[in-house]
Amino acid sequence: MAKFDTEKLRNLGIVAQGDAGKTSLVEAILFNTSMTDRLGHVDDGSSAMDFEPEEIKRRITITSKLHHCDWQDHSLHIVDTPGYTNFLHDTRSCLRILGGAVLLISAVDGVKAQTHTLWRWAEEFEVPRIAFVNKIDRERADFLKAVDDMQQSLGARAVVVNMPIGTEDDFRGIVDLVRMKARIYQFDEKGTYEEQEITPELQDEAERLRFLLVEAAAEADDTLMERYLEEESLSDDDILLGLREGTLTGVFTPVLCGSALKNIGIRQLLDYIVHCLPSPIDKGTQYGIDPKSEEPVERRPDDAEPFSAMVFKTISDPYTGKLSLFRVYSGTVKSDSVVYNPNRDASERIGQILQPEGKKQKPVAEAYAGDIVAVAKLKESATGDTLCDGGQAILYESPMPLKPVISFALEAKSKGDEDKIHSALQRLMDEDPTLQLLRDDETKEMILSGMGQVHVEVAVEKLKRKFGVEVLLKEPKVPYRETLKKSVKQQYRHKKQSGGRGQFADVWIDVEPLPRGSGYEFVDKIVGGVVPRQYIPAVDKGIQESMHKGTLGSFPVQDVRVTLFDGSHHSVDSSEMAFKIAGSMAFKKAMEQAAPVLLEPVMHIEITVPDDCIGDVIGDMNSRRGKVLGVEPQNRNQVVAAQVPMAEVLKYAPELRSMTSDRGLFTMEFSHYEEVPPHLTAKLLSTLQSAV
């Protein structure tokens, strides 16, 4: 890649809720910077960024893509990120390494729940933002309403930098509020425009918005404020200086507008990307720890510093292998060099360094501080790992992966594919850490968990396309348990005589319930050697084996104490096996008389929804036998904390999306086991038996 001064690099992400036009904006940027010779479109499959078959099929961005371009002697590394809830985890990983972001707001839809999440993450990682109100040409578009929505919903101070000339079918161009000029577009997809004076009917509104712009720019810098108070105005250069300062410090967010699909307002957006978003030098020193001493260590964004970088994304391909994308924070790295991974305490050989260009990569000889590059076939490194100079190591903190919210049982379509499923899914999990695979020892099912139903379905489609493995998705079995409600004393005498040495064992046990979550406890109260010491562990083992299948639905038994208090033995016929059988049978008989009950897993769930959905969500949670623990405000949303049986929320993700118009988010984790209500037990057992 051409060597740019670090101060002339811009690493930025295009972030927004789903269907706001992120990929269309990236296509317009690439076209305006001559990286492509035509304006690509998502809908007709000509996009340079959304090229995966699953993305073309659904017309959404599923995984982040990278490209680069030059504008005004600056180099821009651009990351097109997913916006749909199922795939936001990828966006979070990218935000960790980005310098700035362009936040798209739809002029039609305004701010949605996903935008809240993205805004919160951008603040967490201290990523400066500029906003672009897109789709001004669409029906029901309202620029000022979208700006107000930003301020009211996100708590952002939005500073309008340009305003639209007309809306919907009457949209003709934009007014540059810094230079106070109108740009009238020809709608030829080339972004051709003619600069004119502002017409009288727009003058008052333009002057009102410019006054607010000048005030905001002055407030961002003390020197500018003094000048503004003295002269009651600022020059165009002063305004631009104040806009940059306010953006970098997060005091406000500049807002531009246009239409990505029609290529309107894109060049002015590029101007502000270069002018307002930070270079790696503006972002300053990166902090980590020495992996050996755990003392704080820092690295400046300078080519002369020791090399350090973070792997923020992994792409798995059955033909080319693993491709690791990383952001260089300091120093330089050349192809065919050796670096150190402190996360794995391993050395890695860097092969050919590649510069991502959508679905292609361009070989480069060296990467410098601030660059975003890729390298193939790193053996040890995974997403979130640090790469560095082995002699001067540093370990950077990486964001924790989000927790899956929905699970499905997998079944191989063809017999004998189980091993292939496991290895292929492992490759996908290298690429996507939020996918989780486990084998449930109780239900004997392979369980695949993800961020939503579409997320899991896409993973299954990739399994077939990339690795030739076909699977069926089923609703997973709920891991019920059994326990008892009353104490029972039980004897069992095992006696068998069939010629030769016989079998004899006699045990008395006391079975009693324990508090929920206690597990299993075995108590030895044998006195006088009525059961020889060497046989007592066999009784315990027999009981534990019997607990694997209860008497109601053959579910594991838990929360019981078993006390062995009496018994007898035979000097010749007694054996470990005989006492193991006696212990097992005594426990089974005791369970039948001890009022056995079913237990179901209860999940702790936290649901983030807009204010207007809170009643519906609480009502729905009550209908699912959930217990609402509390409601807490969070910005302009509400967070509902509740406990709800797992059986009631196996498919909660799509149902919450439907209930909240895709504005709700939730996290869920196992909490504890509770008794199934008696009126549901018989129905549940009947359903389970009919399914066998």
Image (cartoon, grey):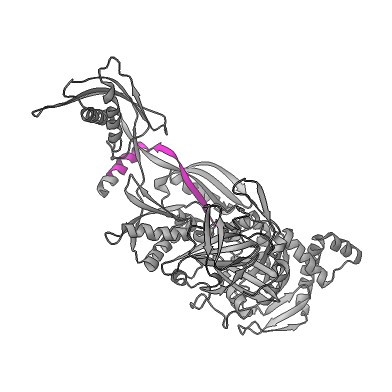
Q: Which residue is depicted at the point 57% across and 53% down?
A: 399
The answer to whether residue 84 shows anywhere in this view is: no
Q: Position of residue 25 (x, y in %)?
A: 60, 73
Q: Position of residue 220 (x, y in %)?
A: 79, 60
> Vertical placement of 536 versus 192: above or below?
above
Q: Report which quarter residue 460 is drawn in.
A: bottom left
Q: Position of residue 589 (x, y in %)?
A: 24, 29
Where's the N terminus, which quadrant? Answer: bottom right
Q: Does the stretch in magenta take in 680?
A: yes
Q: Which residues are magenta?
A: 663-686
Q: Which residue is farthest right?
A: 230
Q: Does the stretch in magenta take in 674?
A: yes
Q: Which residue is depicted at the point 61% across and 61% down?
A: 111
Q: How many marks?
A: 0
Which of the two residues, 282 or 575, is positioned nearer the viewer here?
A: 575
The answer to whether residue 79 shows anywhere in this view is: yes
> Vertical placement of 564 versus 262: above or below?
above
- Tell me if 86 is positioned left or right of 122 in this view: left
Q: Position of residue 248 (x, y in %)?
A: 73, 61
